Amino acid sequence: MSDAMPRAPENKAADFVPSSGDVVDAYDQFMRAFESYRDVNDERLSEIESRITADPLTEEKLARIDAVLDRHKSVLDQMVLKSRRPALGGDPERFSLGARERKSAFEVYVRRRDATALTRLDAKSMSVGSNSDGGYLVPDETEREIGTRLIQSSPIRAIAGIRTISANVYKKPFATTGFSTGWVGETDARTQTNTPNLAELEFPAMELYAMPAATQTLLDDNAVDLDQWIAQEVETAFATQEGAAFVNGDGDKKPKGFLNATKVAEASWSWGNLGYIATGVSGDFAATDPADELVDLVYALKAGYRQNARFVMNRRTQASVRKLKDGDGRYLWMPPAEAGGDATLLGFPVTEAEDMPNIAANSFSLAFGDFRRGYLVVDRLGVRVLRDPYSAKPYVLFYTTKRVGGGVQDFDAIKLLKFGVS
C-alpha cells in the first residue's frame, strides 16, 4: 500500500463518547480511502481492457484498500452509534413515584439479592409476571434502553416492522382473494360484494437469553449505573442472535428468517413465496453488463414498495458490488453522503448484514425490498433478570431473557438476487 493511503485508526470507539470532530475526521478518512479505492479499481479495469487480465499487483493493492475501506466504515459506524445512544437514567425526578420505587427496588435486588421490596411492589400491583424462579422484570426505562440499543445495532431489526405484544403469539389475518370493489353512481343500487377468503400468519415469540457476569466489587460500587451496565452487556449478545435468526432462522425455537421462506423465480411468484431474479452465472454476476440483474431486481418490486426499499447484503458481497459500473462508466455503489448515513446502490440505501450468505453457487446473497412492510419483528413486553450467585462463584451471573419472534409478513415486499443460472 502506498504511503499516501490513509491508515485505519485504532478501533477505540467503544472506549469513549466521540465528539463531532472525531466523527468528522473518521468520515474524512473513510472518503479518502474510497477515492483511493476508485482510482485503483479504474486502473484495474483499464488493464483488463488492454491486456484481458489485470496485473496481480493491482488486484492485491485493490484488495488491501478494500480491507482498509471496510475497517474505516466499521470504526465510523461504531463512533456514530456510540454518539447517538441516549444517556440512561438522568434526572430521577422525571419518573413517577412508582417508577422510582421499582427502579430502587430492582437495584437493591441486583446489588444484594434482596427481593423483598420487589416482591412487595409486585404484590401491590397484582403482577403475575415476576417470581423468584423466573426472575424479575427490569424497570421500564431499562427495557426501553435495551430496545433502543438493539434497533441501533441489529441490522434487520433497524429496517423491519416492529410489533409489541403481551401474549405469546401475534396473529395477523390477510385476504387471499382480495375484497370485491367497484364504481357506482350516487343513486345506483349497490350489489352485495363477495366475502373475501381470509388466512392467518402467526408470529410466536421465542425466548432469547444472555448471561452477563459481574464481580461483587462492581456490584458494591455505587458509582456504577447497573441499569446501564445490564443494557450494555446484553446488547451485543441479543443483537448477534437476532441478526442470525432474522436472516436464516428456521422458526424452531427462534424467529423464521426471510431467507428461510420458499423461493421461486419471479416469473412464477405467488403469495407465500419470495421471488428471485437469477444472475445467469453460477456464483457470480454476469460478465457482460452485470448491472442489468440489479436493475431487473429493483423493478421486480412494485412501485409502492420501491419508495422505501433498500438493498441488504454482507460486506463481502458489498465489496464485489463496489467494483460495478453502469454503461456510462459511473460506479453503482456510492459511499454515504454524511457520517452515519447509508451507502447507496443504484440510489437505494444499503444495509450491511453479516448473516447474509457470501456469493457462491446458487446463493441468495443480495436482497432488495421494503423490509418495514415485508418483515415483522415481534417483541413480547418485559425483560427478565434472574440473579445467580452460585453457578460461577466468585462471579455473579445475571440470566437475562426477552421473548422475540419474527417472519415475513408481506411476500410481495422483498425480492432476492440468486447467483445462479436460473
Image: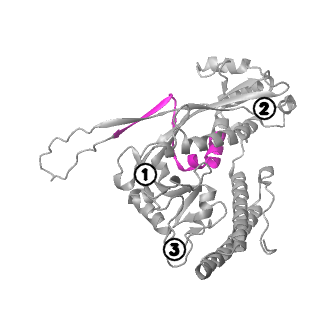
Report the side of 133 relative to 291 (left or right). Answer: right
Q: Is residue 322 magenta?
A: no
Q: Please state which amino acid type lies under the numbered disc 1.
A: Ala
Which corner quadrant holds the N terminus? bottom right
Mark 1: few/some/many CA within 10 Å (<14, 14-19, 20+)? many
> Residue flagged by tag 2: what amino acid is it?
Ala
State the residue in front, 241 or 154.
241
Q: What is the distance, in whole Å, between disc 2 and disc 1 at their CAs? A: 41 Å
Q: Give the residue at mark 3.
A: 326
Region in magenta = 145-174
Question: Circle 1 sits in a helix, a strand or a loop, which is it?
Answer: loop
Nearest the viewer among 191 and 26 is 26
Residue appearing at x 50%, y 46% in the figure: 259
The residue under label 2 is 213
Residue 286 screen position, x and y as percent: 50, 66
N-term mark: 2 or 1: 2
On residue 413, which mark appears?
1
One can see residue 102 in this view: yes
Q: Residue furthest front?
A: 52
Q: Is residue 33 visible?
A: no
Pair 3/1: label in front: 3
Contact (CB < 8 A) between labels 3 and 1?
A: no
Q: Position of residue 224 (x, y in %)?
A: 82, 37
Q: Is mark 2 on a helix, strand or loop?
A: strand
Horizontal side of residue 70 vs 295, given as left or right: right
Q: Position of residue 168 (x, y in %)?
A: 51, 28
Residue 195, position as x, y percentages in the image: 23, 38
- Residue shown at the point (77%, 62%) measured from the top left: 22
Quarter placement of the C terminus: bottom left
Looking at the image, which residue is at 63% across and 63% down?
Answer: 319
